[in-house]
Amino acid sequence: MATISLRKGNTRLPPEVNRALYVRNFPFNTSSEEIYDIFGKYGAIRQIRIGTSKDTHDTAFVVYEDIYDAKIVVDHLSGFNVANRYLIVLFYQQAEMSKKFDQKKKEDKIAKMQEKYGVSTKDK
C-alpha cells in the first residue's frame, strides 16, 4: 500500500534516489536466494549482484524495476537484522563510489613510493 500512496501524489523524490541499491553488512554465507527473499517483498527486482572478493563478500547490489520500490526498501530495510547483523542499505551513487576507489588507489601508490624510497611516516 505504501507504494500506491507514493505513486498517486505528485511526490518528488530526492536526486540521490535511484533504482540501484548498495547493501552492506550481509552475513558472509548469505545466498542470492536469501537476498531475493528479503528484498523481493518490496517489488520486482531486475538484478542482484553479490560481492565475491575478500573485501566485498558482505556486500550486494540490488536493482529494482521501479524507483519507488527502491525508495521504500531504503526506508524499511536500513538497519534490518539478518543473522545478528544490521543491514546498511544505500542508494548507489557512482560518483561517491569512484571517489572512494580513487582514494584507495592514491593511498596504495603513496605507500609503494614510500617503500621504494625508504620513507617512514612513523613519528620519531
Image: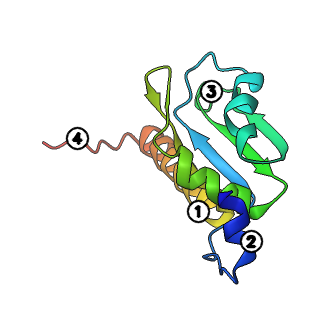
Label 4 sits on residue? 122
Residue 61 at what x, y percent from top left?
A: 71, 43
The answer to whether residue 94 is seen in the rendering is yes
Of labels 1 and 4, earlier in sequence is 1
- The amino acid beneath tag 1 is Glu
Q: Nearer the viewer, mark 4 or mark 3?
A: 3
Mark 2 or 4, closer to the camera: 2
Sequence-first tag of 2 and 4:
2
The residue to which callout 2 is attached is: 7
Q: Which residue is mark 1?
A: 96
Query: Which label belongs to residue 57?
Result: 3
Q: Quadrant of the C terminus?
A: top left
**Closest to the observer, 16 or 80:** 80
- Which residue is rendered at x = 60% and y = 76% of the image? 14
The answer to which of 105 and 62 lies nearer the viewer is: 62
Amino acid carrying mark 4 in the image: Lys
Nearer the camera: disc 1 or disc 4 = 1
SS class of the residue under badge 1?
helix
* Amino acid at pointer 2: Arg
Query: Could you give the CA–CA distance between mark 3 and mark 2, rounded to whole angstroms?
Result: 35 Å
Measured in 3D between alpha carbons, the distance from the residue under mark 1 to the one under mark 3, in whole angstroms, is: 20 Å
Mark 2 or 1, which is nearer the eye?
2
- Sequence-wise, the earlier of marks 3 and 2 is 2
Which quarter of the rendering shows the N terminus?
Answer: bottom right
* Label 3 secondary element: loop
| Residue located 55% across and 44% down the image | 77
